[in-house]
Image (cartoon, rainbow, N blue to C red):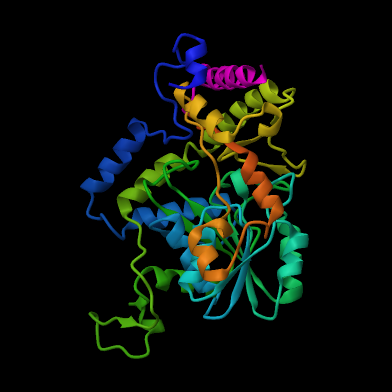
């Protein structure tokens, strides 16, 4: 039993556990999947193209290719960008490992650039310092749903003949200078994991305005095989196909995309609800000496995949583990996003990264705490989070 539970006779703020995030599946979603399962298509059918067209139109781009996960979408983007053995790609250390791993899958090397202290996004100034003759791709991350400084990053890329893969896995529905995130770079990647804004169960998508990159994405998704007579080297008949590249089976299913289409109709409502919850959190925590609330740049509109606070554990004279465990004991499903990628054992062993290499990222991580945030949360759920955090902080203020 935690100390916090003990001070109120062991009674937690909530009776049931509130996760940090959760999908919202309704009867319309279930019917959409059921209808797809009853159709003639289960795998590569019309719902995939329909879903791709919905997202590309929303983001005002020409092309979209859906994949089996956000990770496979990132891998496909790295492939289409032409990353080969020995090439370097620069990304943020504060992200999920897939943002970096996709480079390794192609035989490339990952170079990290430190983050900005205010937005927690990759710092364009630090990107410039890391560019070498081997650099081929930049992979900025729209962390927590806040768009990165994409204009500055695109400018750096143009001057150095680099390709930009925007990892927008957190940011569908976000806006940068009144434009939807997704069509602002060479390639943009979305994720449809259950904790994201909309879900296909597992799934991802890459969008682009570049036809050549689009065609590479399509063939990579399906074993590197084409059945298009116009693209074949040779054609023996209607049964004939050619494997022209080393691709993968990264296909998404038709019934997953049926779910995605149904979920997509609710995207704007889901994003609005996330923003409303954030406003309530910000109002509750803004005056706390121990809490730093997320900063949102004036030229962007975050879609708030995550709500991250920075807690001053030194001021509270307590470590994060105690705060984390105490809030979990209150049935509040706090989390921490993310452990800096360069401090993961694999990256330390393979590339020699060590603590101290990226001080801003490491300082951010040492104080980070993720609070629950998802559209299905009721106002009473939000109040429970606020009350539980107040309860725990007030206990340690003594």
Furthest-bottom residue in this view: 234
- Tell me where residue 164 appears, x and y as whole percent: 63, 66
| Residue at 41% from the left image edge and 59% from the top image edge | 67
For the C terminus, which image quadrant? top right
- Tell me where residue 354 appears, x and y as whole percent: 61, 61
- Tell me where residue 24 appears, x and y as whole percent: 41, 33
Q: Is residue 189 left or right of residue 199?
A: right
Q: In this view, does 316 lie to the left or right of 219?
A: right
Furthest-top residue in this view: 9
Q: Is residue 395 magenta?
A: yes
Q: Chief secondary structure of the magenta span?
A: helix
- Tell me where residue 36 appears, x and y as whole percent: 28, 47
The mark tally for this picture is 0
For the N terminus, which image quadrant? top left
| Residue at 35% from the left image edge and 34% from the top image edge | 28
* Image position of 390 with respect to 143: above or below: above
Q: Is residue 248 visible?
A: yes
Query: Which is nearer the eye, 192 or 229?
Result: 192
Q: Is residue 185 magenta?
A: no
Q: Tell me the quarter of the picture where residue 118 sits.
A: top right
| Residue at 41% from the left image edge and 83% from the top image edge | 231
Q: Is residue 50 left or right of residue 139?
A: left
Q: Tell me the quarter of the picture where residue 16 sits.
A: top left
Which residues are drawn in magenta? 376-398
Q: Can residue 179 be seen in this view?
A: no
| Residue at 72% from the left image edge and 23% from the top image edge | 288
* Image position of 32 with respect to 358: above or below: above
């Amino acid at each position: 039993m935690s100390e916090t539970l003990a001070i109120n006779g062991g009674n937690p703020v909530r009776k049931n556990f509130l996760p940090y995030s959760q999908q919202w599946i309704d009867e319309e979603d279930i019917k959409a999947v059921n209808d797809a399962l009853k159709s003639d298509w289960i795998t590569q059918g019309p719902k995939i193209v329909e879903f791709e067209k919905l997202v590309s139109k929303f983001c005002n781009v020409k092309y979209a290719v859906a994949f089996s996960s956000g990770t496979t979408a990132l891998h496909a983007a790295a492939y289409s960008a032409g990353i080969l053995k020995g090439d370097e790609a620069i990304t943020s250390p504060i992200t999920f490992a897939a943002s970096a791993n996709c480079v390794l899958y192609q035989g490339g090397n990952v170079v990290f650039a430190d983050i900005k202290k205010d937005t927690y996004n990759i710092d364009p100034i630090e990107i410039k310092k890391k560019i070498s003759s081997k650099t081929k791709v930049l992979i900025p991350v729209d962390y927590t749903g806040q768009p990165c400084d994409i204009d500055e990053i695109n400018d750096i890329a143009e001057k150095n003949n680099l390709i930009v893969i925007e990892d927008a896995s957190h940011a569908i529905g976000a806006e940068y200078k009144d434009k939807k995130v997704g069509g602002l770079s060479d390639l943009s990647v979305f994720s449809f994991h259950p904790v994201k804004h909309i879900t296909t169960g597992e799934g991802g998508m890459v969008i682009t305005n570049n036809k050549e990159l689009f065609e590479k994405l399509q063939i990579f998704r399906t074993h590197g095989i084409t059945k298009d007579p116009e693209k074949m080297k040779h054609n023996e008949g209607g049964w004939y196909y050619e494997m022209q590249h080393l691709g993968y089976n990264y296909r998404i299913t038709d019934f997953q995309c049926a779910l995605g289409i149904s979920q997509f109709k609710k995207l704007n409502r889901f994003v609005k609800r996330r923003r409303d919850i954030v406003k309530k959190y910000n109002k509750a925590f803004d005056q706390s000496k121990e809490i730093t609330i997320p900063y949102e740049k004036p030229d962007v509109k975050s879609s708030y995949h995550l709500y991250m606070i920075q807690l001053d554990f030194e001021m509270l004279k307590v470590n994060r583990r105690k705060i984390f465990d105490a809030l979990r004991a209150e049935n509040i499903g706090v989390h921490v996003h993310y452990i800096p990628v360069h401090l993961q054992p694999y990256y330390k062993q393979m590339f020699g990264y060590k603590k101290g290499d990226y001080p801003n990222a490491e300082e951010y991580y040492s104080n980070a705490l993720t609070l629950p945030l998802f559209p299905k949360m009721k106002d009473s759920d939000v109040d429970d989070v606020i009350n539980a955090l107040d309860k725990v902080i007030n206990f340690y203020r003594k």
